Image (spheres, rainbow, N blue to C red):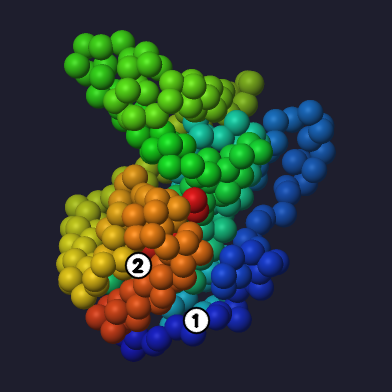
Amino acid sequence: MASKKKASPKDPSLPEAEGRGPEGEGTLPVPAPLEEEKRLPSGVDPLQRYLSEISRFPLLSREEEERIAKEYYETRDPRLAYKLVTSNLRLVVKIALEFQQFWNRNFLDLIQEGNLGLLQAVRKFDPYRGVKFSYYASFWIKAYILKYIMDNWRLVKIGTTQAQRKLFYNLKKEKERLEALGFKPTPRMLAQRLKVKEKEVIEMEQRLSASDVSLEAPLKDDSEDTYRDFLRDPSPSVEDRLARDEVLARFSQILHEFGKTLQDKEKVIFYERLLSEEPLTLQEIGKRFGISRERVRQIEERLLRKLRKYLEERLPDAHNYPLALEGATA
């Protein structure tokens, strides 16, 4: 068996990026249109055209995927990267469909962002950790799609205020919780429970009610095949779930240990801003300590540098985990 080789942070075998992201995600090996597709009329649904185009790429078995991933890790052969990418393009579509309720623009935008996450997963994946590539890649795909939605939510970013962030992450869950208890959730009731304005609940519900692409919709007008039939099931295996639980437990323990090293302002920023589901804003923290918003931002940047160093010292392979801490945007 080939010896395990440490991959270079910047891989010349994959295409250079076009000004996107911190390391440059590059352009995916998108297949050239088939001859018959070139003759399709311009009125054909672009999504149907795209699905038809990527359907000609075969899916890999678990064994094939593992073998190709290891060979690519050792050789950085772009032909192997191409196989990993193209065999998982359907997975990107499947995951993008899960996020469509947050996006009322071109659905293909979400697919493109997910494709960028897929390419990043190819670069970062370590096949010797015992996790399926497709399962690992799903983390990167979701992260890229979610960030794109957060950055491009209509004309106003979804994360502009603490109330918007709270609604974005919790509105659907709170509605389901109330319905399970036998209540019909009204905007006023939801606003009271989530401690936001009723007007903000109504606005968020309008945004989330954008038309969906149904999984049961036919791929083509003359076909009985549906989007669900076309997509592969990304559900993790037992081995993947165990590996995930192990990684998360290890990561959580290290974060807990790091928190014990902090005092005063840094501890508040760490627990009540970076790790909180309802993060405080820079202004709120500044008001608590009697300092400026800019000063809080500087402390936060210093804290993130300390955290990265702490993780690198205790997790030498931390770059292989699709986990990241980012400061809140408000």
Say which residue appears at 66% left-offset and 56% top-offset: 30
Quarter containing the N terminus: bottom left
- Classify residue 239 by image quadrant: bottom left
Q: Residue at x 34, y 60 (%)?
A: 289
User: Mark 1 — residue?
Assistant: 9
Mark 2 → mark 1, Cα distance in angstroms: 14 Å
Residue 61 image point, x, y percent = 38, 56
* Residue 326 in picture, x, y percent from top left: 43, 61
Graded by Cα atoms within 10 Å as few (under 14), some (14 to 19) or many (20 or more), the crowding at tag 2 reads some
**Looking at this view, is 107 or 310 the one in front?**
310
Residue drawn at x 46%, y 67% as measured from the top left = 295
Q: In the figure, 229 relative to 113: above or below?
A: above
Relative to 21, does residue 185 appear above or below in the rendering?
Answer: above
In the rendered structure, the answer to whether residue 267 lies left or right of residue 257 reads right
Q: Amino acid at mark 2?
A: Tyr
Q: Dot 2 corresponds to which residue?
A: 321
